[in-house]
Amino acid sequence: MSTEPQQQQLSPCDLVMKGGSTSGIVYPPVIAELSQKYRFMNIGGTSAGAIAAAVTASAEYGRQCGHIHDFSLLNQLSDDLSQSGRLLELFRSTAPAHMRPVLDTLLPLVSNVQSDDANAEGDQSAPALAGAALTVADHLAPELLDLLKAQFGLRMQLATQQLSNSSQISKVRRDIARVRTLIREKAVQQ
């Protein structure tokens, strides 16, 4: 069966995707669904959206060459990325060496993920960094960490389509900005 008639029945569609770490989870199944009704013509994006755009362009090219199952592979990509801890693993593995101690310190605070490197004996960078943050504003740091953890949780809920009220993300983001402003003010005063 030729794909020529199917291609002519699909409406043309331009697609632009924005960035954000959760986009890697959200875009693939959406693109797979849209591909059933549309033929993608001009595709672009920024950051993670650019990666999704490249994958979409590749799948569209494959479809035009007769590989009709290329878009169904996007659902497998989404399933892989949505596995518990997978995105964090990808971020940590691609981080520059000088940023890994910072990630090892902060990731356990915003999630339940523990890194073997951060727990290794003799790693003094994590306690030193945490101590420096707490001396700036002892009573605000725990609140900031709670807000960052809440923001991360809300973003993951949004990415997995489990968030019913997306305005919660904006509220938490504003609260984080307020706390960071107070911490900066206290640091300037000291």
Image (cartoon, rainbow, N blue to C red):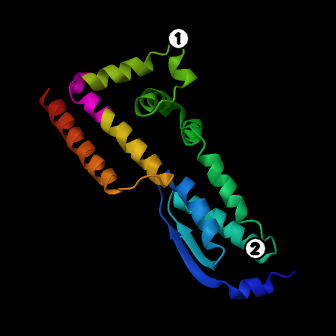
Q: Residue at x 51, y 57 (%)?
A: 47
Residue type pointed to by label 1: Glu
SS assignment at label 2 = helix
Mark 2 Cα-neighbour bin, 10 Å: few <14, some 14–19, many ≥20: some
User: Dot 2 corresponds to which residue?
Assistant: 63
Q: Left of 77 or right of it: where is 46?
A: left
Q: Residue at x 35, y 23 (%)?
A: 130
Chain part drawn in magenta: 135-145
Above or below residue 109? Residue 23 is below
Which label lies toward us, 1 or 2?
A: 2
User: Dot 1 corresponds to which residue?
Assistant: 121
Give the residue furthest to the left.
189
Q: Quadrant of the C terminus?
A: top left
Residue type pointed to by label 2: Arg
Mark 1 Cα-neighbour bin, 10 Å: few <14, some 14–19, many ≥20: few
Q: How many marks?
A: 2
